[in-house]
């Protein structure tokens, strides 16, 4: 079989992947190995694909993750599906799996640390909330015992429709019907002997749902969807066809993804004026997606996609690109091997359904927070445009009017603090990334968030400092800053705020370390640029009891209002 079908992950005719093809994809990047594994699963089946996967070195493309899996059925029937689904999501799975909802011996290994836990249950009797509530109680205990987020994947979502507010640290993640074409997830024909177990397709769908949750909580899920325009967002080609009507199902899918928190952008080889005019005509269309950035011109498609990434400060590994042209797909995939490139092929409704059902693109935040995200990235693009127009950094910062507000970490904003901890990849000092439970339990007076505002409006909560007292020192566990706030001296203001707190508490010094992580090059020079002395791999700022704690950076204003406790 080497034909081009409606499989969106295949751009050119090719035989089913073998071990050599998977090895090459693994060396190329995360996006390449993900597409190869999807293709192999569809054409060879899960079992054969897992055997191939185990034969190749995948360490460069996949990030290790440790997961506790509790099931109300025999978990061994789904372990291969889980390993493959996690690899497709960019994760190298270390699994501790047990049958039963009461934590067993495997859960006692919590000292080794679990990144998340999954609870998978067969369809529950009846449609009331009682049995669903019992599962949620078990999941809540699991979250407390393991100190990690827990996802409940129900065999029948109706059992959870009438449940009360979810316990802290617990999410319910139903399997999207489109993943199975609404087929049953479980086979109960042998319930009396083998028990109720997932069907082969049900196992893959449950595993994909689990991997999507794990990718989201570990910061590996997509943040940005970049779409083509001609014959993708609309039918036809501008300048060649008299009408270019919006494809309503696809446009509505992109708008729905924006409502879930995805940033939406476009990259199109086209005349900018023609695109502006076409989008203006679609301004009243409810299915028109909210674009955070448009890259339009006659450059090659990889150049335009690169412009989007540069403008929004997001990485290829957190990006999905959709285009109807297989040549464009192949060229973008070659330029950005970590990118999730998808060919717009087949029926429009099927493409829309594929995107909406993808567990990697499931909602992770409230509708209000998701709507804010697109606004924040549009403002970031405006900031970068202002930077280009300014003659120098001093003028740029003066025009920008950067204002910071210190925000205490409270139960209301712990989810945002945890989101920063897992999503920030560029300006981050260490791998200390506490989840919601761990953040809520820290209780350090030196932990805080910062909100950023400027002449373009609010950019929301963009920075997180995690620090603790250790003898006469205050030690920085981590400092994280959103890409929306880079190159604005915000990081130096955050250090100054921490120094003030440490000084007021009677500490004699601040201590920090910087680990070399995959993408944290922008953060590696922080302490040196701030003038901190380095000794033995640690950076130490002495705090003079008789002098000021630290210098405040020029171009940044601290809001004089009382420290906020906003969400």
Image (cartoon, helix red, strand yellow):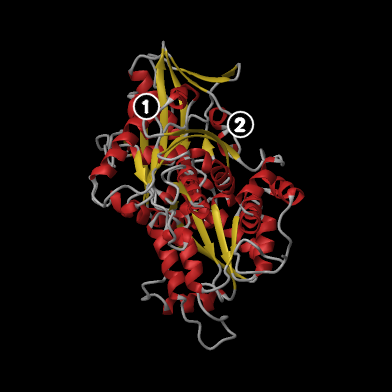
Figure check: 284 above or below 511: below
Figure check: 319 above or below 242: above
Choose between 9 and 386: the one closer to the eye.
9
Q: Mark 2 Cα within 10 Å, few/some/many (few <14, many 20+)? A: few
The answer for how far apart the CA atoms under marks 1 and 2 are is 31 Å
Q: Where residue 452 appears, x then y in whole percent?
A: 38, 44
Which quarter of the figure has residue 144? top left
Q: Residue furthest bottom?
A: 242
Please give left or right for residue 419 compared with residue 563 in the image: right
Q: Which residue is mark 2?
A: 516
Write the residue at 54% across / 28% down. Answer: 527
Write the residue at 62% across / 61% down. Answer: 9
Q: Which residue is mark 1?
A: 145
Element at label 2: loop
Q: Where residue 525 appears, x then y in whole percent?
A: 58, 32
Q: Residue furthest top?
A: 471
Choose between 416 and 147: the one closer to the eye.
147
The numbered dot on residue 398 is: none
Please give left or right for residue 339 compared with residue 77 in the image: right
Choose between 325 and 469: the one closer to the eye.
325
Q: Nearer the viewer, mark 1 or mark 2?
A: 1
Q: Where residue 30 appears, x then y in whole percent?
A: 63, 48
Q: Quadrant of the image for the C terminus? A: top left
Q: Earlier in the sequence, mark 1 or mark 2?
A: 1
Q: Residue furthest front?
A: 192
Write the residue at 40% across / 36% down. Answer: 149
Whether residue 110 is visible to the viewer of this picture, yes or no, is yes
Figure check: 240 above or below 539: below
Q: Where residue 394 appears, x then y in whole percent?
A: 50, 45
């Amino acid at each position: 079989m080497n034909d081009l079908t409606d499989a969106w992950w295949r751009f050119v005719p090719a035989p089913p992947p073998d071990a050599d093809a998977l090895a090459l994809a693994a060396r190329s990047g995360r996006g390449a190995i993900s597409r190869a594994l999807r293709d192999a699963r569809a054409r060879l089946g899960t079992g054969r694909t897992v055997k191939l996967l185990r034969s190749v070195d995948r360490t460069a493309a996949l990030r290790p993750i440790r997961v506790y899996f509790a099931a109300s059925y025999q978990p061994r029937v789904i372990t291969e599906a889980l390993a493959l689904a996690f690899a497709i999501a960019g994760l190298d799975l270390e699994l501790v799996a047990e049958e039963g909802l009461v934590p067993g011996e495997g859960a006692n290994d919590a000292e080794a640390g679990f990144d998340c836990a999954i609870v998978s249950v067969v369809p529950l009797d009846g449609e009331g909330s009682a049995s669903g509530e019992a599962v949620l109680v078990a999941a809540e205990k699991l979250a407390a015992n393991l100190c990690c987020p827990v996802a409940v994947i129900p065999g029948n979502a109706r059992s959870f429709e009438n449940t009360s507010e979810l316990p802290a640290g617990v999410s319910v993640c139903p399997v999207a019907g489109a993943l199975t074409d609404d087929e049953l997830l479980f086979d109960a024909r042998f319930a009396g002997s083998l028990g109720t177990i997932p069907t082969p397709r049900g196992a893959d769908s449950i595993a994909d749902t689990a991997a999507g949750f794990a990718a989201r909580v570990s910061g590996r899920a997509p943040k940005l969807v970049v779409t083509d325009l001609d014959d993708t967002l609309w039918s036809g080609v501008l300048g060649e066809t008299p009408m270019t009507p919006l494809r309503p199902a696809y446009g509505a899918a992109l708008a729905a993804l924006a409502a879930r928190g995805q940033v939406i952008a476009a990259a199109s080889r086209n005349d900018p004026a023609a695109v502006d005019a076409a989008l203006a005509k679609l301004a009243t269309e409810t299915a028109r997606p909210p674009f955070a950035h448009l890259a339009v011109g006659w450059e090659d498609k990889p150049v335009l996609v690169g412009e989007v990434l540069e403008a929004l400060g997001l990485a290829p590994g957190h990006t999905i690109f959709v285009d109807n042209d297989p040549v464009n797909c192949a060229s973008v995939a070659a330029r950005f091997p970590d990118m999730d490139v998808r060919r717009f092929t087949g029926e429009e409704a099927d493409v829309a359904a594929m995107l909406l059902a993808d567990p990697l693109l499931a909602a992770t935040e409230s509708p209000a927070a998701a709507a804010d995200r697109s606004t924040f990235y549009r403002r970031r693009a405006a900031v970068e445009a202002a930077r280009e127009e300014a003659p120098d950094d001093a003028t740029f910062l003066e025009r920008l009017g950067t204002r910071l507000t210190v925000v205490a970490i409270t139960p209301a904003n712990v989810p945002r603090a945890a989101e920063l901890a897992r999503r920030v990849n560029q300006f981050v000092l260490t791998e200390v990334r506490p989840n919601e439970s761990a953040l809520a339990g820290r209780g350090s007076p030196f932990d805080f968030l910062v909100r950023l505002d400027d002449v373009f409006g609010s950019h929301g909560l963009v920075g997180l400092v995690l620090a603790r007292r250790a003898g006469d020192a205050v030690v920085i566990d981590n400092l994280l800053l959103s890409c929306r706030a880079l190159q604005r001296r915000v990081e130096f203001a955050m250090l100054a705020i921490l120094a003030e707190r440490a000084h007021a508490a009677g500490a004699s010094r601040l201590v920090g370390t910087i680990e070399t992580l995959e993408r944290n090059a922008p953060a590696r020079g922080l302490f040196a640029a701030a003038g901190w002395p380095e000794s033995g791999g640690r950076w130490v700022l002495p705090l003079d009891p008789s002098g000021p704690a630290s210098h405040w950076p020029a171009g940044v204003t601290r809001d004089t209002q009382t420290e906020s406790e906003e969400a």
